[in-house]
Image (cartoon, rainbow, N blue to C red):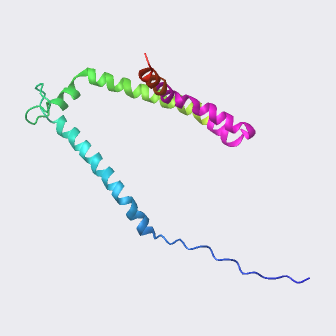
Amino acid sequence: MSSTVVAARPLPENRISPVFRFAMLLPGGLVTFFLILFALGLVVFLAFRGNDGSLLGVGLTAENFLTVATDPLYWTVTLRSLVIAGLVTLATVVTAYPVAYYLAFHAGRRRNLLLFLVTLPFWTSYLLRVFAWKIVLAYN
């Protein structure tokens, strides 16, 4: 019995150059970058404006920063927010990683059902909006 040697078919060439791929990302990336930069600049500008009750304030001042640095209320609220954020992060890690590990390595045939049950709470806001629109648009 003789064996036939067949040359392997070459892999298809990727005709899109990496430079072109990067260039395709530039318009959206630049728009996003400048919008974020504009928003950040607006926040900094408004932070230095005086608080006289008008929309934009009058003059440039550092009084707002001094108020935040010296008023204990801001420190209390900031500390409380950081503690709550840390506790929520810890609770999420403690509950989510074991579930993710089980789904990745041990779920077997029940994986789809468990993924459905895990993602079900994320649908709540969407369902509430749908039912709210049904109520708003219903015939009275």
Query: x, y (%) of residue 81?
Result: 37, 26
Q: Main secondary structure of the magenta part?
A: helix
Q: What's drawn in magenta, residue-wise?
A: 99-128
Q: Could you tell me which residue is drawn at 72 percent across and 81 percent down?
A: 7
In the image, 3 versus 91, the foreground residue is 3
Does 16 sit above or below residue 127?
below
Q: Where is residue 25 in the image (x, y as percent from the top left)?
A: 39, 59
123 part of magenta stretch = yes
Q: In the depicted view, which residue is nearer to us: 45 or 56?
A: 56
Left or right of residue 123, residue 137 in this image: left
**Of all residues shown, which one is farthest toward the top?**
140
Q: Does the magenta stretch include residue 117?
A: yes
Residue 135 is situated, as x and y percent measured from the top left of the image, at: 45, 20
Quadrant including the C terminus: top left
Asked where in the image residue 54 lies, by quadrant, the reply is: top left
Picture residue at 33% right of the left edge, 50% below the top = 32
Q: Nearer the viewer, residue 43 or 35?
A: 35
